[in-house]
Amino acid sequence: MDDIFFWCSKLFWGIVSPDGLLVIVFALGMGLWAFGRVRSARRLLTVLLGIIVLIALFPVGSWLLYPLESHYPAHPELIDIDGVVVLSGAEQSQKTSLWDSVNLGEAAERDLAFMALARKFPTAKLLFTGGSGQLLAQDFKATAVARRLFKEQGLDLTRIIFESESRNTWENAYFSKRLVNPTGGENWVLITTGWHMPRAVGCDSIPC
């Protein structure tokens, strides 16, 4: 059942994602043109072109993500914490394997924040969670990249628990809780990208 949900969620997002919707609208416009609905096709394709130009000229994505980015404070005061958990997302596993060098993507701030807090709180428990979110490339795990990155940056890997089976945010939370088994009074710092934080926040965690 979990595999079915994972595949369906990936296919669904491929359709309703902004890129997917633009492709669908374009295909619909071309379909109308092919069936002789030229006027309707021109109108639809003109609107599509306007949207593409708008996205190209203005930071529409940043405007749309801002409410999510600003939902939680960017730098909460951290005094007494029991653990730090970071969600994968920056690690480019296939490129790392291909070039034999650590490759990170747009969410590299997650790992940077994790390393900073690991040094700031030397007694805190540390957890990295994330396997592969790809449909087919399950052999390339984010944990392998993170392990290499943290080692190269001087972190003590014996302090870090690596969870490598999760494929999405829900599984991040599920497998992480099983590994760590936190008590009700523990304070954990959750690290992820700002726009992803509302989705990632589950129980008692401190946004970071």
Image: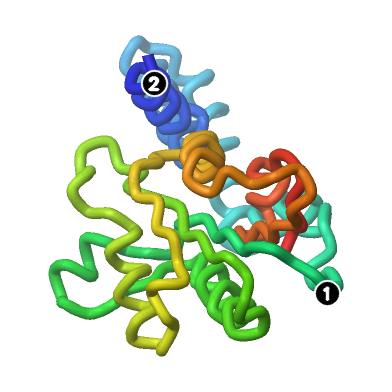
- In the depicted view, which residue is nearer to us: 68 or 166? 166
Toward which corner of the image does residue 6 lie, by quadrant? top left
- Identity of the amino acid at label 2? Asp
Q: Quadrant of the C terminus?
A: bottom right
At x 44% / y 26%, what residue is drawn? Answer: 9
Q: How is the image coloured?
A: rainbow
Hey, what amino acid is under mark 1? Ile
Q: Residue at x 27, y 36 (%)?
A: 135
Give the mark nearest the N terminus, 2 or 1.
2
Residue 63 in sight here: no
* Secondary structure category for the residue under label 2: helix
Image coords of residue 80 (percent x, y) = 80, 70
Q: Which mark is residue 79?
A: 1
Give x and y (percent) for residue 71: 83, 53
On the rendered structure, is 29 left or right of 84? left
Distance between the Cα atoms at labels 2 and 1?
38 Å
Other residues around mark 2 within 10 Å, as few (<14) / some (14–19) / many (≥20)? few
Q: Secondary structure at mark 1?
A: loop
Q: Quadrant of residue 191?
A: bottom right
Location of the N terminus (image quadrant): top left
Q: Which residue is located at x 51 percent, y 72 percent?
A: 111
Q: Give the camera-side residue of 89 and 116.
A: 116
Residue 180 x, y percent position in the rendering:
54, 49
